[in-house]
Amino acid sequence: MQGKYSFEYAVVRVVPHVEREEFFNAGIVLYCPDQKFLDTRFQMHEDMLRVFCDKLDIAGLKEHIAAFERVCKGGKDAGQIGKLPIAERFRWLTSPRSTVLQTSIPHPGLCDDAREMLEHLFEQLVGRKD
């Protein structure tokens, strides 16, 4: 029987007006050290985002998401942060910031398979299918 692995995850939120503290869940980032796993999953529903904030810079938001995904993958395409170990990249991604793309505080859990847990949390907390 396979053992349980500890993981941490955070909900990734779109925060169009930081001063209003309103947000829209748009993704999940999950880190599992034992499985050497750091990945994210996003879903952009542009129509829903425009209803939420009609002046939202969708192109700019897509750039933020692409940068977030590059940091998860690591490597030279993610700049200096991409060279950091997985744990440090997760901490950097989930650190508090005042930008259009923010994360919840990290939450812990146990899983058998980090990728399956990422998909499960995405469906449960972002809650929209493609």
Image (spheres, rainbow, N blue to C red):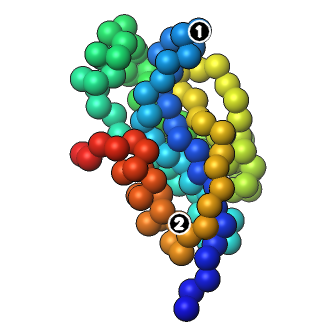
Q: In the displayed image of the protein, which residue is found farthest to the bottom? A: 1
Coordinates of residue 33 in the picture (x, y in percent): 68, 65
The amino acid on which the numbered mark 2 sits, given as a three-letter code, is Ala
- Residue at label 1? 19
Q: Quadrant of residue 119?
A: bottom left
Coordinates of residue 73 in the picture (x, y in percent): 56, 53
The amino acid on which the numbered mark 1 sits, given as a three-letter code, is Glu
- Residue at label 2? 114
Determine whether, in the image, residue 57 is placed left or right of residue 71.
Answer: left
Crowding around mark 2 (Cα neighbors within 10 Å: few <14, some 14 to 19, many 20+) is many
Comparing 112 with 60, the one in front is 112
What residue do we see at 48% from left, 62% from top?
117
Q: Quadrant of residue 105?
A: top right
What residue do we see at 61% from left, 83% from top?
3
Quadrant assignment for the N terminus:
bottom right
- Whether residue 106 is visible to the viewer of this picture, yes or no, is yes
Crowding around mark 1 (Cα neighbors within 10 Å: few <14, some 14 to 19, many 20+) is few
Which badge, 1 or 2, comes first in the chain's sequence? 1
Coordinates of residue 29 in the picture (x, y in percent): 54, 48
Comparing 10 with 101, the one in front is 10
Coordinates of residue 36 in the picture (x, y in percent): 64, 67
Distance between mark 1 and mark 2 Cα atoms: 34 Å
- Whether residue 74 is visible to the viewer of this picture, yes or no, is no
Determine whether, in the image, residue 75 is placed left or right of residue 61.
Answer: right
What residue do we see at 42% from left, 36% from top?
26
Comparing 56 with 71, the one in front is 56
